[in-house]
Image: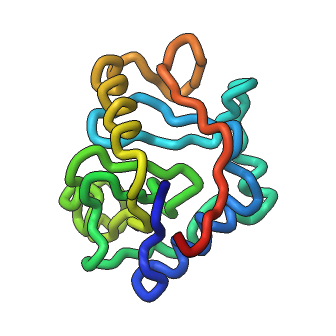
Amino acid sequence: MVEMAPLSMMPHSVHLFLQMVDHKLWDDTVFLHTAHHVLQAAPIGYSDGRSRREEFKDANLDELTFQEYSKDYPHVKYTVGFGGRPGGPDFYISTQDNSQYHGPGGQGHHDLHEEADPCFGKVVKGTKVVDRMHRRSIATVGRSGSDWNKDDVPITSIVAVEIIENI
């Protein structure tokens, strides 16, 4: 269960993510186990291994209009952020404090290295599941590539995502 960041801090990122969920774009996709410090959700079909990026693009929900960041909502353990420039559609869950790596100045390989990945939510229920997925990632990092194949890259299925209000 992910609680969204306050709208006063991250309105654009929260809105984009909730629209993705509302359009069911994350249903039947995957978390890739390819890094030590994050669990990356990718728009790849679990059932067929097919890229779903075009579905996000067709819905005009494939990327942020601008990089948004709040110093008051940093990338600590269990927070959720958009990766890339511009961010989206891929998102990740931090499995450690990534404030320096994904915060301002942490991504020096981007044109505007002072920008940061948007951090827009935090896992508030299910952290043991995140930890279990992370242990699996640590055991398998190094067996990944840009061409995803169920047999090559360990994955976790995202069956369905739904919005739950006012918990």
Count how many numbered circles sit on residues in the image.
0
Q: Image check: 69 left or right of 26?
A: left
Using the image, determine if residue 159 lies above or below residue 11. above
Q: How is the model colour-coded? A: rainbow
Residue furthest to the bottom: 8
165 or 134: which is nearer to us?
165
Where residue 80 appears, x then y in whole percent? Answer: 41, 57
Name which residue lies at 28% across and 34% down: 36
Name which residue lies at 20% across and 53% down: 97
Residue furthest to the top: 151
Using the image, determine if residue 54 lies above or below residue 113. above
25 or 112: which is nearer to us?
25
Using the image, determine if residue 123 lies above or below residue 47. below
Where residue 11 appears, x then y in whole percent? Answer: 51, 81
Where residue 121 appears, x then y in whole percent? Answer: 43, 64
Name which residue lies at 44% across and 22% down: 144
Where residue 88 appears, x then y in whole percent? Answer: 55, 57
Name which residue lies at 60% across and 38% down: 158
Residue furthest to the front: 167
